[in-house]
Image (cartoon, coloured by chain):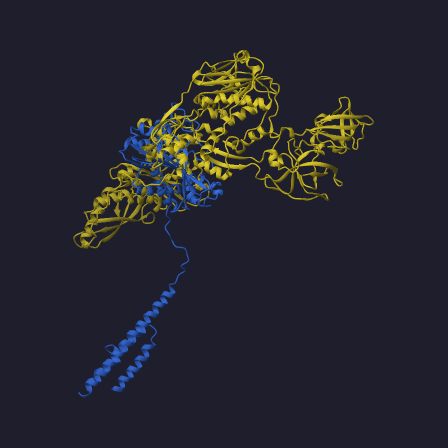
Amino acid sequence: MKEQLAKIEREALEAITAAQDPAALEELRVKYLGKKGELTALLKQMGKLSPQERPAMGQLANEVRAVLEETLELTSQKLDAQALEARLKAEAIDVTVPGRAPKTGRRHPMYLALDEIKDIFVGMGFTVLDGPEVELAELNFDRLNAGEGHPSRDWSDTFYFDRDSRVMLRSQTSPMQVRAMDSRPLPIRIIAPGRVYRKDEVDATHSPMFHQVEGMVIDKGVTMADLKGTLNTVVEQLYGKGTTTRFRPHHFPFTEPSCEMDVQCHKCGGVGCPTCKGEGWIELLGAGMIHPNVLRMAGIDPEVYSGWAFGMGLERTAMRRFKIADLRLIFENDVRFLEQF
Amino acid sequence: MNLSRKWLSEFVDIHASDKEFAEAMTLSGSKVELTHDLGAEVTNVVAGRVLSMERHPDSDHMWVCQLDVGKEEPVQIVTGAWNIHPGDLVPVALHKSTLPGGKKIEKGKLRGVLSNGMMCGLSELGLDERDFPYAAITPAALLNDYHPIDPEKPSIPLGVTPGHKLFGSVKAALVTKVENLGGGQFTVNCDSGGLSHTVTTTLPNIHEHDTLALDVEKEEILTLAGLHAEQKEFPHCIPDGIFVLQEDCQPGDDIKKVTGLDDHVVEFEITPNRPDCLSVIGLAREASATYDVPLRLHEPLVKGGGPGNLMELLDVETPDPDLCPRYTARMVRNVKIAPSPKWMRERLRAMGVRPINNIVDITNYVMLEYGQPMHAFDYRYVKGGKIIVRRAVEGEELTTLDGQLRKLNRNHLVIADETRAVGLAGIMGGENSEIAADTVDVVFESANFDGTCIRKGALALGMRTEASAKFEKGLDPMNTLPAVNRACELVEVLGAGQVVDGVIDILNHVPHQRTVRMDPDRVNALLGTGIDPVDMYRYLERVEIVTREKNFPNGPADVLVPSWRSDVEGIADLAEEVARFYGYNSIPSTLQRGETTLGGYSEEQKLEIRLGAACRSQGYDEIITYSFISPAWYDKIGWPADSPARNSFKILNPLGEDTSIMRTTTLPSMLDILARNYNYRNKDARLYELGRVYLPGGADGLANEAKVLTLGAYGEGFDFYDIKGAVEAILRDIRAEGVHFEAASPQVWGDAVAPYHPGRVAAVMSASEDCLGFVGQLHPAVAKNFGVDGALYCAELSFDELMNAKGADPVYTPLPRFPNLTRDIAVVCDEAVTVGALEKAIRQGTRGLLREAALFDIYRGKGVEEGRKSVAFSLALRADDRSLTSEEADEDVRSILQALERDCGAKLR
C-alpha cells in the first residue's frame, strides 16, 4: 500500500505540474482526490490493514493528500497568474491614441482678465457693482467735474440719444463712482466693470465699444500713498511679485492729484523694445485722489473724507496678458481664436 | 507738441541725453511720447568745395570732380548731376558715410573712374525745397542733351552747330566760358555762330562746351518751358541735382551743423489742463522746475519808428466783449516779403511747421515760442482801417486761407472790416486778406478769444486748426502783449519791415491774480507723506506759485497763482504741484487702513458666474458682441416693420448705420457671429453671450438694461435636441425645478418667435408658468438673411427669469433602501400627441410608486398604423418603506396605462 501511495503521489504530482489550464487541473483533482478518485479509492482499502499499520498508513495517506492539495493550489495559482498575464497582454492598447474628452467651452479672454482683477479686489474687501450703460450726461460728466465745454462732451467724441445731450452712452465707467457715492454708505470700496462707448472708428487698437473697470475707495484719512500701495499689490498679483511700477503725474477732471501707472516692460526689463515702443514702460491705468469738487457734489465733505479712484481698460489688459496683437480679434469671435483661451 | 532742444536751450540749460530728459520730464508731469535726433541717420557727411570738374572720359553725362573736404588731399567724386560748378560748396557723403533711410555710401568705380563718395541733393539728406527755398533748381535746355522723341523726326537737328536758327530770334549757341558768381548766379559767355554774348543767369546746369538755346535779341537762355520741350527730350536737364549750399561754412564742416540737422526734437503729450505747455516757453518753465535750474526769459524790445500814427491807421471794436476778452494788435509798414533766415526756418521745421515767408513764419514762430496764436493780415484789405470782432451774420460767407468757402452763423466769431469778414477769429484767416508777395503793410493780431466759442465754431465747420486747438483750452490773456511785441521785434531783427509805434490793446476782461490757501499739513495728509513745509513752498516757487512775501513759511499761507496756471484752484491742485516735484515715486506705498469692508459678489453676480460656467461645461464658448446694431437687423430676423419690439434707443450721432441703435434683442448679434464663423468655414460652433438688451422705459429716461443669456450653435449632426439639452443642463445646474418646454406658436408668442422655424421652437416655461425664453432652430429664411444656408440653433433666456427660477440650496434626501422595479411599456397614439403630454399622463396615472419615466423609443412604420406612432418608456417604481411586490408594481402600471388611454388615447401596443 505504501508503494501504491508513493506511486499515486508521483504520478499525480507529475500530471499536476504538467497541467496547462484550470480545466485539466480540475480533472486531475477529481481523478486523484475526488470521491471516486484514486487516492480516495486507496484509502477505502485502509480497512484491510492491521490496526497497527493503520495509523502510520493513515498519516502517510493524509500527507500525500496534503501534498497533492497544496500542489494543486499552487499550480492553480500559477495558471491563474499566467492566464491573467496573457489576458493583460492581449488587452494592451495604444495609449497614444487621443482620448475622448468632452468638449468644454472657453471663457472670453477679456473676461478672463476681468475675472482675475475682480478676484483680487473682492479679496481686499471690495464690492463689485453693475450699472447702466445708457447714462445721464450729468453723471458721466457734470458730477465728475467735467462741465459744459469739456472736449470729451463733444458730439464728435460721445454718443448721444437726444438733442439736449442729456442721455448718452457712458464714455467711461466713472459715473459708477457717482452712483456709488449717491447710493452707498461710507466707507466705500467698490469696483465697477462694464462696457463703455466712444466715437472711435474700428482699427487695431480702437473700438467704439470696449470695457473698463473702475475702482474707488472713500474713507477718512485715505491718502495717495494708500492708492499706490493698493494698486501695487494688485499689479503684483496680476503680473507677479517683484513687478516694477512707476507713477506719473497726469490729468483727469475728477481726480487731483492725478496719475498714470506704468509697469516696467516685461519683455525688455525697462531697456526699451518694440513692445513698449522703446519707453521701457507700459501704461496700465489712470488714477488719482478724488477731486474735492466731486466729493462735494455728492454731499461728502472733502475736509473729513478723502478717496482715490482708478480706471483701467480691460481689452488692453487682456491683449497684453495674452499677447493679442489686434483689438478686432476680441470682437470678431472666431472660434479658432476663442478656443485658444 | 514738438520741442526743439536747441530752441529750449535758449531759455534753460539742461545737460541731459534725450532719454534722460524724456524720463525726467515725464515723471514731473510732461509726458514725452518720443524723442527724435534729426540727424541720427546722417554720419560722415561734410561740406566740400568743388575745385575742378572734368567730363567723364567714358560717359556722355557724368562729371569727375575734385573736392576740398577740409583734408590735405582733395577727394575725387564722380557725379551725374549738372548743376554744380567749381567754387560751389556742396554736401559730400564721404567713403563709409550714412544717409537717411539707412543708405550707406562707400567708394567705388563709376564707368572705370574712382569715386570716393557722393555729393548729396536735398532729398538725400531728408530735406526738401521748403527747408531751403534757394536750393530749387530750374535748368537750361542744353541742346547737347537733346533726345528726340521720334529719332526719325527730330525737331532740332542732331549735332546742331552754333548760329543755327531754332525759331524766331532763338539760335543755338556754344558756351565758351562760365563764371560762378556765387549765390546761384553765373555769367555765361557763348558764341551764336560768330556773335559772342555774355549773359547773367541763375540757370545752374551750364558748362563750357555745352550748346544752349539763346534768344539773341533778349540775350536770354531758354529753359525747357521756353522751348516748349518735354522733360524726356532733355533727360539730364532736370529740376533736381546737388544741394549747392549758400550757408556760412567751410570745407570739412559737419553737414548736420550746416543744415540744422544737429537738433533733437522731443514730442510731448500735453494734457488739456495745461495749455501753457503748448509753447517753448511753457515747456522751458517746466524743464527749469524739473531740473531746478534758472529760466532765462527774454523781454521783447521793439525799436519802432515806422511811418504814421497807429491810432489814425487802425481802429478796433469788440461789440461782443464776452467772446473777446482781449484784443492786441500792432502794425508793420513797408514790409519786404522774403524767405525767413535759416535759423528761423530750422526751428520751425524742427517743430513740424512748414516755412512760408518771413511774415507768416514770424507769426508761427511766436505762436510756438509763446503759445499765443498770432495772425497777420494785409492792411490794404482792411477797409476803412477798422477791425471789428463780431459774431457772424447768419449765412455770412468767408473763404478761408485753405481756399474753402465757409458758411457761417451767429455762433461764429469773425474778424471783419466795415464791409465784410476778413478772418475766422481764432481759427483761420481769410483768403481776402492773406499776406502776399506784394503786401506792403501788415497788421499783427494777438488776441484772446473765448475757448468754448472757438471750439464750437471750429467743430461746426470741421476745421480744427493749431490756433483753435490752443484757444479752446483757454489761454492766458496776459500773453497777448508780449507775443505781439515779440513778433514786431522779430520783424526788426529780420529787417522785414518798419514797426509803427504804439499798441492797440483792448482789455474787456481784466483778470485778477488768483490766491489759494496753502496748508502743508493738508497736503501731507492727502499725499500720505511727511514733506517739510518749507520744501513744499520751494517746490511751488519752481513753478512761480509764491507767497506775497516770496518767502518759505513753516505753516499755512496764501499763495499767488500765475496767470498762465488757471488750472490751479485749490489745495488738491497745490498738492499735485508739490507731489510733481517731490516725485510721485517718492510717495510711500501703504496699505489701506480704516474700517474693513466685506466685499464680494451679489446674488445676481453669483448667478452670472454660475451660468457662464454651465454654458462652458456644455461646450459653449463665450463671445462679446456690440450693444449697438443696425436697424436692418430687425428686418433680417423677420420682425414686422410695425413690431413694437423694434422700439429702440437711437444714437443721434452714430459712427454709421450699422451701429446706430441699441439692441432690444441679442439674437441678431449671435446670428451675426454664427454666420461669420460659418463663412470662415469653421466646421462647428457653440457660442454663448450673457449680454444686455436696452429697452425703453427705464428710470430718468434711461434704458431698462435687461440681461439675456444667448446660446447659438451649428454643426454636423447638431440638432434641436442638442441645444435643448444644453438649456436643460444649464437649468439643472441652477436647480431650476419644474421647468418645461412647450411648442411656441407665433399665434401665442408673436414676434418673439418670428425668427424661428415655426415647427422647431419651444417656449421654456418655469414651474409658475413664466416664460424664461425660447429655444429653437432658426427659420431658414432668417439663416439665409445672415448668409447661412445650413441650420442654425439658438436659445434666448431672460436673466431676470433665470434669477427667479433658480432653485434653493439642495437638501439631502436619504438614499433608497429598497430596490427599484422596472417595467417597460410601449403605447400607440396619434402622431399629434406629444411626448410631453404622454409624460404628463404618466405622472398623473401613477399611484405614487413611479420614480422615473424615461423615454427610450419612438417608432413609426410596420405594425403601427399610418398617422400613429409607438412610444416606449422605461418606468422605475419604488416604495421607500418596503420591497415592492410584482403585483403592486403591475397595479401602478395599470393605472398609468389607464391614464394614458384616457388622456391621450394611447393604447398599450
A51 displayed left or right of B513:
left
At which x and y percent is residue B139?
A: 70, 30
At which x and y percent is residue B240?
A: 66, 32
Residue A23 lies in quadrant: bottom left
- Decide: is B380 above or below A4: above
- Nearer the observer, B623 or B773: B623
- Decide: is B473 above or below B105: above
Outermost residue toward the right? B194
For chain A, give the colour. blue
- Nearer the observer, A42 or A208: A208
- Nearer the observer, B143 or A244: A244
- Decide: is A314 above or below B568: below
Q: Is residue A208 visible?
A: yes
At which x and y percent is residue B131?
A: 60, 30
- Decide: is B886 above or below B652: below
Q: Is residue B829 visible?
A: no
Q: Residue at x 35, y 43 (%)?
A: A233
Q: Residue at x 16, y 52 (%)?
A: B881
For chain B, give the colour. yellow
Total marks drawn? 0
At which x and y percent is residue B483?
A: 51, 23
Residue B263 lies in quadrant: top right
- Nearer the observer, B850 or B503: B503
Residue B340 lies in quadrant: top right
